[in-house]
Image: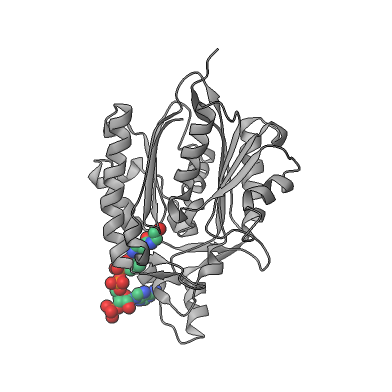
């Protein structure tokens, strides 16, 4: 039997314990004389709360429970995984990769393990690479993880960025399939826009309005690109699962695709922008609460620093 495709066998996610509501964060910032409010954050972003990792808790620590949940959902042991790809902007160390550290934490060795760095588009990049490797026959079962301790990059004196981001992890297990699960993917980058969202030194620097405009345009185009590649119409999408950065950007994309809010998975209110973790986190939450189920068509998409963007059309 020739297996020319990959499909999602299971999903998992993890949010660190410490939940910080907008009001908690406003109170924290006020102690340093920085003014913000629950009302401003909700109105401009849709975010109500985010989770922050505990001191010393690293991306691989968040990735581990997400990966274990995805493996359990897939009905596989870690020993059956021969490829681990971790998308992260906040690796535990410069090296070894977070994927290697995760592999050790899973108690296995021998398979390929590496990180990809495409910031908030990271999960789409990682998924595309893993799908290609499975289709090429160079991997059989892949663990694809997005994990971030993005709070480690935040300047809590910059209210324009620190209210937006949170920490978390999401994971999927991909396996070979006779029928296409991952129908089409597309990835893009424009390094000329590196300066609109970057970490020039230790903390995030962002031109919010420039990112907003670039994001809405890029997301519509890449969504149409994967639909065209797969020969599908936007109306065939059961669930749009966008990068959970800002509800206004997400609604803008859904509107351009002619999809109502009811066909979009929205979890940003509960965890803010978790960068590379955001798409698999939203996917897993929606799988576990019963919104997403087998047989449905999903459009995943991400956009972020680089500037990078990408999408995947999936029969789940
Ligand atoms: O993965 C991609 C990650 N990045 C993004 O998704 C960011 C995309 N951009 C955005 O989401 C929006 O641009 C923001 C949410 C960052 C900002 O919203 P905005 O509607 O573009 O607001 P703005 O930057 O134009 O700021 C409006 C006002 C300013 O005050 P003045 O100049 O009008 O007096 C800001 O100083 O809001 C002020 N402001 C705040 N006020 C209260 C900025 N941040 C805050 C804050 N609380 N946290």
Residue 123: % across, % down: 48, 46
Outermost residue toward the bottom?
33
- Taking the image in four quarters, ligand 1 sits in the one at bottom left
Residue positioned 41% across, 82% down in the render: 35
Q: Residue 139 occupies which quadrant of the picture? A: top right
The residue closer to the viewer here, 130 or 30, is 130
Q: Residue 79 occupies which quadrant of the picture? A: top right
Residue 278: % across, % down: 48, 51
Question: Is residue 265 toward the left or the right of residue 20 in the image?
Answer: left
Residue positioned 46% across, 80% down in the render: 157
Residue positioned 66% across, 62% down in the render: 57
In this rendering, the answer to whether 41 lies above or below 158 is above
Instruction: State whether residue 172 appears in this view.
Output: yes
Outermost residue toward the right?
107
What colouring does the structure picture have? one colour
Residue 274: % across, % down: 49, 57
Instruction: State whether residue 46 appears in this view.
Output: no
Residue 48: % across, % down: 44, 63
Which quadrant of the figure contains the N terminus?
top right
Residue positioned 52% across, 22% down in the render: 177
Q: Residue 76 occupies which quadrant of the picture? A: top right
In this rendering, the answer to whether 100 lies above or below 130 is below
In this rendering, the answer to whether 59 lies above or below 285 is below
Q: How many marks?
A: 0
Question: Is residue 251 toward the left or the right of residue 66 in the image?
Answer: left
């Amino acid at each position: 039997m020739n297996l020319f495709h990959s499909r999602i066998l299971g999903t998992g996610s993890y949010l660190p314990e410490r939940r910080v509501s907008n009001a908690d964060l406003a109170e924290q910032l006020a102690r340093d004389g920085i003014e913000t409010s629950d009302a401003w954050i909700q109105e401009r972003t849709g975010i109500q709360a985010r989770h922050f990792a505990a001191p010393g808790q690293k991306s691989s620590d968040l990735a581990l429970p997400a990966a274990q949940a995805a493996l359990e959902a897939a009905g596989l042991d870690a020993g059956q995984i021969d490829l681990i790809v971790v998308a992260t902007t906040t690796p535990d160390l410069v090296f070894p990769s977070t994927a290697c550290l995760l592999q050790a934490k899973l108690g296995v060795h021998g398979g390929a393990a590496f990180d990809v760095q495409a910031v908030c588009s990271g999960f789409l990049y990682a998924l595309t690479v893993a799908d290609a490797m499975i289709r090429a026959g160079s991997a059989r079962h892949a663990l694809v993880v997005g994990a971030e301790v993005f709070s480690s990059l935040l300047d809590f004196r910059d209210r324009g960025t620190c209210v937006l981001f949170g920490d978390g992890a999401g994971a999927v297990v991909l396996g070979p399939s006779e029928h296409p699960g991952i129908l089409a993917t597309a990835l893009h980058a424009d390094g000329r826009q590196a300066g609109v969202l970057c970490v020039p030194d230790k903390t995030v620097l962002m031109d919010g309005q420039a990112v907003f405009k670039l994001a809405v345009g890029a997301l519509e185009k890449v969504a149409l690109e994967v639909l065209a590649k797969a020969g599908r119409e936007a109306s065939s999408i059961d669930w749009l699962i966008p990068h959970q950065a800002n509800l206004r950007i997400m609604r803008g994309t859904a509107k351009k695709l002619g999809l109502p809010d009811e066909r979009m998975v929205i979890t940003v209110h509960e965890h803010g922008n978790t960068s590379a973790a955001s798409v698999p986190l939203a996917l897993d939450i929606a799988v576990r609460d019963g919104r997403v189920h087998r047989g449905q068509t999903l459009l995943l998409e991400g956009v972020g620093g680089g500037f990078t963007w990408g999408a995947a059309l999936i029969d789940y």
